[in-house]
Image (tube, rainbow, N blue to C red):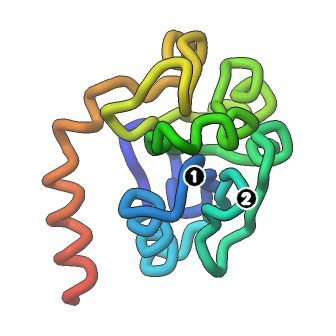
Amino acid sequence: MLSKIRDDFISDKYLFCGKAGNIGLAWKEASEVMGFDLSQCCAPGYEMDDVRIYHDIESAVRGKDIICTDSVPAESLNGFSVCRVTKEAMDMANKNAVLNPCPPFYRGEEVSDDAVRSEYFAGYEFKKHLLTVQQAIMIWCMR
């Protein structure tokens, strides 16, 4: 399946960095419905069931194409520091990897300022297409 920035987003390997909450579980459901590979990088105790888990960003990003994040609860920030997506970590991902943090994201928390300022950052444009994507997923599921 084609997108505007990926040749075949279904064959890409995805990494979700964050807790098992609404954003992470939505990525998990999308991976189950659409068949793409999804892993999670998180602090111990925040794992989703039935996905490959990493507890450090350097191991997690290797071999990944799409890196997604969600904000981390303030009381959990210290535990998630080893999961912060930095430019250095993105350099370890696959060639042409994309960083797609879920807004609002917080520079210096789940994602570093240098990662957001890098060529990896998907930008803010994707947010304006979110409703269209959600509608397409609903139609796809109902067929």
Mark 2 vs mark 1: give the one in front.
2
Residue 82 vs 20, above or below: the answer is above
Residue at far right of view: 59
- In the image, 39: left or right of 122? right
| Residue indicated by mark 1 | 16
Question: Is 10 or 129 nearer to us in this picture?
Answer: 129
Residue at far bottom of view: 143
Q: Amino acid at mark 1?
A: Phe
Q: Residues within 10 Å of mark 2 (few under 14, many from 20)?
A: few
Q: CA distance from mark 2 to mark 1?
A: 15 Å
Estimate the x, y position of residue 64 in percent, counting from the top left. 70, 47
Location of the C terminus by quadrant is bottom left
Residue 44's disc number: 2
Q: Residue at x 54, y 12 (%)?
A: 113
Q: Residue at x 39, y 30 (%)?
A: 105
Q: Quadrant of residue 30?
A: bottom left
Q: Secondary structure at mark 1?
A: strand
Q: Amino acid at mark 2?
A: Pro
Estimate the x, y position of residue 29 in percent, counting from the top left. 43, 75
Q: Are marks 2 and 1 in contact (CB under 8 Å)?
A: no
Question: Is 43 or 3 nearer to us in this picture?
Answer: 43
Q: Residue at x 66, y 72 (%)?
A: 51
Q: Residues within 10 Å of mark 1 (few under 14, many from 20)?
A: many
Residue 2's disc number: none
Question: Is 43 or 140 nearer to us in this picture?
Answer: 43
Residue 75 vs 24, above or below: the answer is above
